[in-house]
Image (tube, coloured by chain):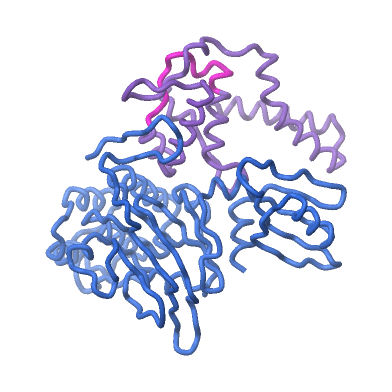
Amino acid sequence: MNTVTTTPSSAGVALHATPPDPAPSVTASGLCVGHGTQTVIDGLDWALLPGQVVGLLGRNGAGKTTLLESLLGLREPTAGTVRLFDQPVATLDDALRARIGYVPQQSDLFEWLTPAQMLGYFKSFYPRWNEAKVEGLLSKWDIARDKRIAELSGGQQQRLAIVRALAHEPDLLVLDEPVASLDPAGRRDFLRELVDQVLNRGTTVVFSTHILSDLERVAFNVAFLSAGRIAVQAPLDELLETTRRLIGPAAEVQALVQAQRMRVIGRTALDAGRLQVLARVADATTPAPQRTAAVHVEPVTLEDLFMGLTQ
Amino acid sequence: MNPVDLFSIATGSSEPIYRQLVEQVRRFVAGGQLRAGEELPSVRELAQALAVNPMTVSKAFGLLEADGLLERRRGLAMVVAPQHRRAQPTAERVELLRPTLERAALEARQLELPAAQALALFKTLLRDAEDDAP
């Protein structure tokens, strides 16, 4: 196990002893993916840097699953490219493939096998396999080793999928709604495992979830998927500190935004000519504007950001 | 008490988690629960206990170090800086509470609550907090 080293300054803290690859773990450029005639992902550009934990947010049907599957090469793009560890995903070699862990939204586990048989089968594909970790998690998460997978509960199947994805100590972990069937205690266990993974291995993690409180804990960065593109990606701390919600008569709101040189990232027309915008201050050192007689200025939460940025 | 248990975070807040941790350490030092030379939990311990991203804890500790509240022992944990030997005087600690109470006062006014009612609620909450204290 690596030891934790931290630099004195808060910026660019190295949390694992080995320096990470400088190249992005994932790069998508001009990515377009469709279902039939419908375009779901539409010219999307995205990069995930080594060691980043990125939460992917989007409304139902925004294409989160399509995007994650495309990143893994499970879907053919109509245009654009995806590179994993600096190799085109379509021709990824086995050594790099073994560095990826994936928890799909739909369980694709081998239901007629037992967990012990299934994990034994997968073990043979990977050069690295942490048996102690697998055993530890199976016990801790109370997963019956010798019961048929079909007979496990939804939550246990999901935990098993997580065990499988962590067993070979991936450098890139892709999680599509990994906690949907877990109760709060199960979700907390999972988050701790994720924290461990980041602490010990500096794993790059991207995960989608609708449970904002989980995301807030572990995702240092958040990305909002809207209209087939990443509308905003930033550290969540910065987004919360630099974004304000302005509500008031449209003209007055717009005037305040302009006077403060704020960047509008979300806009909702309200009735009676009123306007609500989410806007970021010009730069991190500029203080947010105070409320005026006509315009309310309020801090935002992750939920506000979600509502405003995923329309 | 294990210092890890001092900390708690709230999600769904407009205050980022690292900021919540910074303010908690400030209050514990001001109140004398954490004193000069006392060790804070490591980034690892605190990140695991709270199930938060370790970068968030590092960021909080980094800021507290820059502010002179904490010091980094070489290769070891963060400790409370030597000038914080005892709790701050009551008058100074009360000032730390002012921003929160200003907000509460404003909201009480917006709700047109009588002062006595608002104060009664605060008294009850203070008693509850005492009962919950570990």
The residue range painted magenta reads B28-42
**Residue B74 locus on image (x, y percent):** 33, 21
In the displayed structure, A240 sits above or below B3; it is: below
In the displayed structure, would residue A295 be above or below residue B33? Answer: below
Q: Is residue B29 magenta?
A: yes
Q: Is residue A103 left or right of residue B71?
A: left
Q: Where is residue A116 in the image (x, y as percent from the top left)?
A: 17, 61
Q: Is residue A131 left or right of residue B63?
A: left
Q: Residue at x 16, y 61 (%)?
A: A126
Which residue occupies 83% across, 47% down? Answer: A292
The residue nearer to you, when weighing B109 against A229, is A229
Task: For chain B, give the colour.
Answer: purple
Determine the residue positioned at 65% across, 49% down: A282
Q: Quadrant of the rendered structure where residue B131 is? A: top right
Q: Is A255 placed above or below A67 here?
A: above
Question: In which quadrant is the N terminus of chain A drawn?
Answer: top left
Residue A245 in the image: x percent, y percent?
71, 53
Chain coloured blue:
A
Judged by its main secondary structure, the magenta piece is: loop
Asked if the stretch drawn in magenta spans residue A108, the answer is: no
Q: In which quarter of the image is residue A13?
A: top left
Residue B18 placement (x, y as % from top left): 52, 38
